[in-house]
Image (cartoon, rainbow, N blue to C red):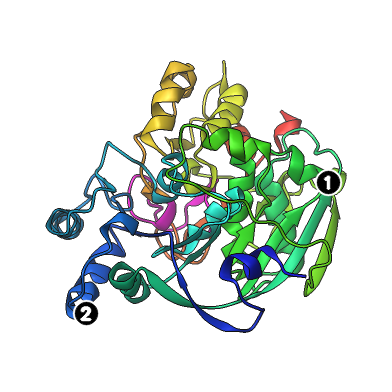
Amino acid sequence: MATIAEKILTGKAGEIVEREVDYVMVNDVTGVPAFEVFEELERTMQQEKVVVVQDHYVPNKDVASAEQAKALRVYARKYGIANYYEIGKGGVCHQVMIEDGFAAPGRLIIGADSHTCSYGALGAFSTGVGSTEAAAAMATGRLWFKVPTTQKFVVNGELNKYVMGKDIILHIIGDISVSGSLYKSQEFYGTTINNLGLADRITISNMAIEAGAKAGIIPPDNKVFEYLKGRVRGEYKPVYADADSDYEDVFEYDASEIVPTVAKPFTPDNTVPACELDVSIDQAYLGSCTNGRIEDLRVAAAILKGKTVNPDVRMIVTPASEQIFKQAIEEGLIQIFLEADAFVCSATCGACLGGYLGVLAKGERCVSTTNRNFIGRMGHKDSEVYLANPAVVAASAITGKITDPTEL
C-alpha cells in the first residue's frame, strides 16, 4: 500500500529517513557555497555522484558572475569532478541531467535548485535542496528526508489543439493554489498523461514545486524506457505505486475542459484562459528548463513560419541544451525564428531568473514559457511576467498582445 515516494525513500509518510542518493547536482549559483561548506567538513568527495553545471549566469554577464563561474571551475578541477559541464557543452542543468542519462526511474536525486523535481517525469524521486544539504551529500553520498504524503492527480481525455503540458500543470496549480501541495509528493495518472510525450511530462514535473510539492512523479512507461536506451548511466529499476496506495487527496480533471492557459502576475496560480486576456506585451520569451525542449521549439516555429514578430515586441529564444540547439538548427527551426525577427541565443537560463539576455525594464510585460512570475522575477520590480505555453508565446509575439493561438 505504498506510493512511489514511499517506495523510493523506503519509508512511510511522515517518517524521517536517511538514504543513499544516486546523484547530487549543483550549478553556478548554488555550487560555490556547496563546495565551501564541503571543505569545512574535511571529508572525501563522492565524485561519482556529483554533477556540476554552469548555466545561470554564463556566458558571464559581469565581473561578479565571472568570478563565481571561475570559482566553480576551480572547485570542479580540484576535486576531479568528471560530470562537469562547461558553457557550450551542456545547457540548463535540469535538461542536462535528463538528456545525459543521470535521471532514471526509481532513482533518488537531489539538486541545489528548486526545479530538480523535473526528473520525476522519468519516474525518479528528485527534489531541490539547499547548498548545505548538497555539501553533506557530496561528502557522504547520503541525506535525510521526511517522507512526504502523496496526492494523486488524474487527467483523462483528449487535449484540444494548442493545449500542452504547461496548460495541464497551470490548470492544476490554478485549482489547488501555490501551497496546495506543500511538502507533498504529486503523482500523475490518466489517459491524457499516458499520451503525453516526455517533453510535456517534464514540464508538468518541473512545475510541481510551484504548488509547493517536494516531487512531481509520473510512472515510467515505454516512452521513458525508449528515451533512456543508449543514454542512461548504469542500471535502473522502475518503481510503481501499489494499486491500493493511501493517497492524501485525489484530484480528477477532464482534459477537454483545459484550454491554453496563462498565469497572470504575480503567482503561478493566478490563472485565466488566454482568450480572456487583452494585454499588450513588450517581450515574448521561449525557453528555460520548463519549455526549452525541441518539441517546444517545433510548436512555436510552426506558428511563426512565414510570419514576423510584431515590431513592438522582441522575441527571445533560448534552447534548453546545446544538443537541442544543434537539433533545432538541423531541423530548420532556428532559421524560421531568425526569419521571423526573433533573437536566438545558445543554451542558458538567461532571462528566466532575471539574470540577463532579456531582463525587463520598469513597466514592461513579458509572456514567457518559464515557471515563475513573482515580483521582479525577470527584472524590474514593476515589470510583469505572464506564464504560458510555447504556442501562446509564439502567437502573442506575432500579434503584440497575449493571444490564444487558436485565434490566429
Is 333 in front, or is 183?
Answer: 183
Badge number at residue 41 = 2
Q: Amino acid at mark 2?
A: Leu
User: Was residue 389 drawn as part of the magenta stretch in this picture?
Assistant: no
Kind of residue indicated by mark 1 = Ala
Seen in the picture, residue 293 relative to 126 is either above or below; the reply is above
The dominant secondary structure in magenta is loop
Q: Quadrant of residue 377?
A: bottom left
Say which element carries label 2.
Answer: helix
Furthest-bottom residue in this view:
15
What is the span of residues highlighted in magenta in the rendered image? 352-372
Residue 270 seen by the camera? no
Distance, label 2 to label 1, CA atoms, is 50 Å
Horizontal side, residue 148 vs residue 160: left or right: left
Residue drawn where x is 67% and y is 37% of the image: 222
Q: How many marks?
A: 2
- Residue 356 in picture, x, y percent from top left: 32, 50
Q: Position of residue 212 (x, y in %)?
A: 60, 71
Where does label 1 land, which residue? 255
